[in-house]
Image (tube, rainbow, N blue to C red):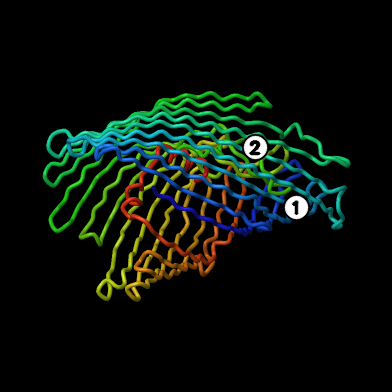
């Protein structure tokens, strides 16, 4: 038997500046929005992971693992002001006073069976998984408009919405491994997974003296997805050479329906994903490898939700039910020298990359963001990782430098859009042993910026320090970490294409201190044995890492 329990109390703070230049029937209008979001009630999250294994004999293992969490309802106050130049429809600026809250629960259950055969390396694994995630976001907006004389125009606008969401996931998976001849091995398996998300948006507007349903925004969105997959993988070692080749096939059937409007989207597609790698071990612990793979990245469930969330009177975010998966071809050449020097050259070609997409709603003359598919992105990068040991390995420094050049091309209604440029990432990590039980970690990182879809991302950095003290013969450890001491982890960028002229500055509470006390008891071999994956890890990630 094994398990752990954790509790986390979290407050948050965030500041967002959005700058938009829109073409309106009255001419060019600039919207300069400044918003601050701050917790007024902290979120308390309780999480538990527990499991049990039964060994009827040395060859068989039957296990059950349960993960569950509960997040209490937290409240966030969002206050903002939007300056409009020149005044638009008689409005010089607007103030927004919003409240957002969310609570949630989740449970994941995995039942697994493993049989190890007499032949070394021959085994069979079975996994059955079920998960349910539920949340209930709530938002209430109050917008006040001012004219050129700084006088309030009419009565404040008040809106509210509630969007309960339920995600159900079922999965069955089988994996089999079989040694072939000398130093050769085959692995094969299959998986069937079904997912369903149900979002029921209730939107109200305050009219006169009471709340009334806003039929234009109230909607229910149901998304279902089934993925049938199978794979085969063969590996062979020949002296100092090692080869691996594999093929995975996936058939996807999905359906989305907006119940209120009756809008349907049924899609099915079959994909094949080959992989290949070859490596060679040269003397003195050197190695070189070459690999190729084709893979896909599916959109998150919330990204598919078409509902709109208002930020203030003139801006919003919304999902996109027509998002497609992104497909990537990837080629990599890597080498290692004595386990302290690693070099890597990588080329990737991605179609339908899922990116943050600034948009303008010309009907309502508002601006917002959504998730969209960006045509084609090619990138080539080179990475160098060096480990420097000092003072008899009491101080180990790890320097990683990566340079990249990317070029993205998308066909828009106004013509071909190209976004290309270079980027540089430098990270230096230091692990220092002060005493046998006390250690320090100092990390610095610089990101020069880069290109992603429609966005040009500007530079940022991070500098963090941590201390760890081991106690009670290493069964207990106490750690203190201070993150982003210089407060340089800020998102900045802009987009210029078609009718979009958008800039973003986003600062959040990235500078914080963590104090953690951890005590381990029981059998360490049990914990190590149960560090296993389940059959729905991909689906859990798409549900928002719940």
Residue at 48% over, 48% down: 452
Where does the image place residue 33, in percent across and percent down from the top left? 69, 54
| Residue 535 picture quarter | top left
Residue at 69% over, 38% down: 362
Q: Can residue 233 be seen in this view?
A: no
* Nearer to us in this view, 380 or 160: 160
Farthest-out residue, front:
56
Q: Can residue 175 be seen in this view?
A: yes
Which residue carries the number 1 mark?
96
| Residue 114 picture quarter | top left
Q: Are marks 1 and 2 in contact (CB under 8 Å)?
A: no
Which residue carries the number 2 mark?
307
Q: Is 251 left or right of 307, judged from the image as shown?
A: left
Where does the image place residue 216, in percent across and percent down from the top left? 74, 32
Name above or below for residue 145 compared with residue 303. below
Label 2 SS = loop
Q: How far apart are marks 1 and 2 (CA)?
A: 20 Å
Which mark identifies residue 227? none
Categorize mark 2 by other alpha carbons within 10 Å: few (<14), some (14-19), many (20+).
many
Categorize mark 1 by other alpha carbons within 10 Å: few (<14), some (14-19), many (20+).
many
Q: Is 486 left or right of 220, judged from the image as shown?
A: left
Residue at 49% over, 46% down: 545
Name above or below for residue 211 compared with residue 251. below
* Nearer to us in this view, 310 or 105: 105
Q: How many labels does the image show?
A: 2
Where does the image place residue 197, in percent across and percent down from the top left? 56, 33
Where does the image place residue 451, in percent across and percent down from the top left? 48, 50
Reading the chain from its start, which is encountered first: label 1 or label 2? 1
| Residue 247 picture quarter | top left
* Nearer to us in this view, 159 or 28: 159
């Amino acid at each position: 038997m094994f398990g752990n329990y954790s509790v986390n109390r979290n407050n948050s703070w965030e500041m967002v500046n959005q700058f938009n230049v829109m073409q309106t029937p009255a001419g060019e209008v600039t919207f300069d929005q400044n918003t601050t979001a701050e917790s007024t009630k902290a979120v308390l999250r309780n999480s538990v992971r527990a499991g049990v294994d039964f060994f009827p004999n040395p060859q068989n293992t039957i296990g059950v693992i349960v993960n569950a969490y509960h997040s209490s309802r937290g409240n966030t106050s969002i206050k903002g002001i939007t300056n409009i130049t020149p005044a638009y429809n008689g409005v010089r600026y607007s103030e927004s006073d919003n409240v957002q809250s969310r609570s949630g629960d989740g449970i994941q259950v995995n039942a697994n069976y493993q049989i190890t055969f007499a032949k070394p390396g021959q085994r069979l694994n079975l996994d059955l998984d079920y998960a349910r995630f539920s949340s209930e976001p709530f938002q209430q907006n109050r917008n006040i408009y001012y004219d050129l004389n700084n006088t309030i125009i009419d009565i404040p606008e008040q809106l509210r919405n509630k969007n309960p969401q339920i995600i159900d996931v079922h999965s069955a998976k089988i994996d089999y491994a079989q040694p072939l001849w000398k130093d050769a091995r085959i692995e094969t398996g299959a998986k069937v997974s079904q997912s369903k998300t149900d979002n029921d948006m209730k939107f109200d507007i305050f009219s006169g003296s009471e709340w009334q349903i806003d039929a234009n925004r109230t909607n229910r969105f149901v998304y279902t997805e089934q993925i049938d997959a199978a794979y085969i993988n063969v590996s062979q070692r020949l002296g100092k050479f090692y080869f691996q080749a594999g093929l995975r096939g996936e058939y996807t059937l999905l359906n989305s329906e907006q119940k209120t409007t009756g809008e349907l989207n049924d899609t099915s597609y079959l994909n094949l994903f080959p992989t290949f790698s070859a490596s060679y071990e040269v003397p003195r612990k050197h190695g070189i490898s070459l690999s190729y793979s084709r893979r896909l990245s599916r959109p998150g469930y919330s990204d598919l939700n078409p509902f709109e969330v208002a930020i203030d009177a003139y801006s919003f975010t919304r999902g996109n039910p027509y998002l497609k998966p992104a497909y990537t071809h990837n080629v990599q050449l890597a080498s290692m020298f004595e386990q302290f020097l690693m070099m890597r050259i990588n080329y990737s070609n991605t179609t339908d990359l899922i990116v943050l997409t600034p948009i303008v709603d010309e009907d309502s003359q508002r601006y917002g963001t959504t998730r969209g598919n960006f045509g084609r992105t090619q990138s080539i990068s080179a990475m160098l990782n060096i480990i420097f040991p000092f003072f008899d390995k009491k101080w180990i420094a790890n320097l990683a430098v990566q340079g990249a050049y990317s070029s993205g091309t998308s066909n828009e209604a106004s013509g071909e859009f190209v976004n290309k440029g270079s980027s540089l990432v430098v990270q230096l990590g230091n692990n220092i042993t002060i005493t046998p039980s006390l250690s320090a970690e100092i990390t610095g990182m610089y990101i020069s910026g880069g290109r992603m879809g429609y966005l040009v991302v500007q530079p940022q950095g991070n500098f963090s320090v941590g201390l760890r003290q081991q106690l009670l013969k290493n069964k207990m450890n106490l750690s203190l970490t201070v993150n982003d001491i210089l407060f340089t982890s800020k998102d900045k960028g802009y987009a210029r294409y078609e009718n979009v002229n958008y800039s973003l500055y986003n600062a959040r509470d990235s500078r914080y201190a963590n104090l953690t006390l951890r005590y381990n008891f029981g059998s360490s071999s049990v914990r190590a044995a149960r560090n296993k994956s389940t059959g729905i890890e991909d689906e859990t990630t798409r549900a928002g890492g719940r």
